[in-house]
Image: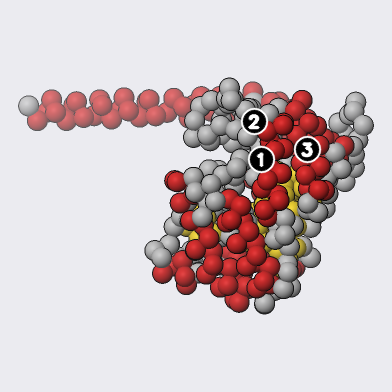
Amino acid sequence: MQHNRRDFIRKAALAGASVAAIPALSACEGAGTSSSANDNRSNIYKDNELKSQLIIPKNNGIQITGTFLDEISHDIPHQNWGEAEWDLDFQYMKAIGIDTVIMIRSGYRKFITYPSQYLLGKGCYMPSVDLLDMFLRLAEKYEMKFYFGLYDSGHYWDTGDMTYEIEDNKYVIDEVWKNYGEKYKSFGGWYLSGEISRATKGAIGAFHAMGKQCKEVSGGLPTFISPWIDGKKAVAAAGTALTKEEAVSVQQHEKEWDEIFAGIHEVVDACAFQDGHIDYDELDAFFTVNKKLADKYGMQCWTNAESFDRDMPIKFLPIKFDKLRMKLEAAKRCGYDKAITFEFSHFMSPQSAYLQAGHLYNRYKEYFDI
């Protein structure tokens, strides 16, 4: 019995050794035949002297000179950058002419970007890094203007009522100006971060109250908003649909925003409508109305040129260059004052988690002869 057991173990060990040797032998046998393949691979290289042969006029759109900084990453993946990565990104931004950075929100629900004593007292989570201080320092280093995005409690998204956002931001605005605004010369303005598309409940009052306070504490620094157009592609990010049947007409859009601008223009200096919710052949019609209304109320007309694609079932990936180009060209035709984007670091940066973002950066540079 003992002899049989030893014999079985010996045979099993020999069999195992034979199986283990097969891949090693195969690798040795293949070593000689793969050398030519390796030689061929060593001859593959990227010729950086080659440029795309564009068949459309170059430099025919408005250049992007501002970007949001989305460090809360509510519906796009977090890239987990430290200061070294952010410093490099600011260099990439500077290289294509970006002179304005906007922290899209200082907090969303319980996640916040700086150690706000007020918001921590309300149950928000402590961040590991003071991102607000870092962004202000980097903006100063690279001679950019920084806009501070207000806090978003999430109550508006739950209720449809914008007035909930006023109370928390009363404290946030004062706290931020005292601790950061008076300290950094790069602190150049305010972004009223509530996103609306139509005549939303409480929107005029909320924008007016928050814009007024921002201006009063900071000695009149500029404020802006970035609403969306309730077009055919204005669908829920969490859903699977790419379009909807009910979309606002140009006439109704003009009527509603005429009313909103009338109520906020004294304390809101610019409006940057998001450009991704309408189709490409609708751009001129809506952009013309936006510019007309901004001029009527003495506001600057910016465009928020979305650099992510709303036409794909995967949400969200960097946009096809031609789509971004068409939107920037429409903004130039309609005489817009400035183009910002949502958002450089994920969708245009050479160090983005998305490989195609760096390619978009290169196509953008070719088109604008940068």
Residues at badges 1 and 2 in contact (C-beta under 8 Å)?
Answer: yes
Q: State the residue in front, 252 or 130.
A: 252
Label 3 vs 2, first from the N-terminus: 2
Q: Which mark is residue 289?
A: 3
Q: Residues within 10 Å of mark 1 (few under 14, many from 20)?
A: some
| Identity, as a three-letter code, of the amino acid under mark 3 | Val
| 254 relative position to 128: left or right | right
| 57 relative position to 316: left or right | right
Residue positioned 31% across, 24% down in the render: 15
Q: State the residue in front, 63 or 354.
A: 63
Residue sticking out furthest to the right: 57
Residue positioned 70% across, 38% down in the render: 255
Residue 253 visible, this angle: yes
Q: CA distance from mark 1 to mark 2?
A: 10 Å
Which label sits in the foreground, 1 or 2? 1
Label 1 vs 2, first from the N-terminus: 2
Q: State the residue in front, 355 or 250.
A: 250
Secondary structure found at label 3? helix
Percent from the top left, x then y, of residue 287? 78, 37
| 355 relative position to 14: left or right | right
Residues at badges 3 and 2 in contact (C-beta under 8 Å)?
Answer: no
Secondary structure found at label 1? helix
Q: Residues within 10 Å of mark 3 (few under 14, many from 20)?
A: some
Which label sits in the foreground, 3 or 1? 1
Residue 137 visible, this angle: no
Residue positioned 70% across, 61% down in the render: 267
| Identity, as a three-letter code, of the amino acid under mark 2 | Val
Residue pointed to by mark 2: 248
Q: Which mark is residue 256?
A: 1
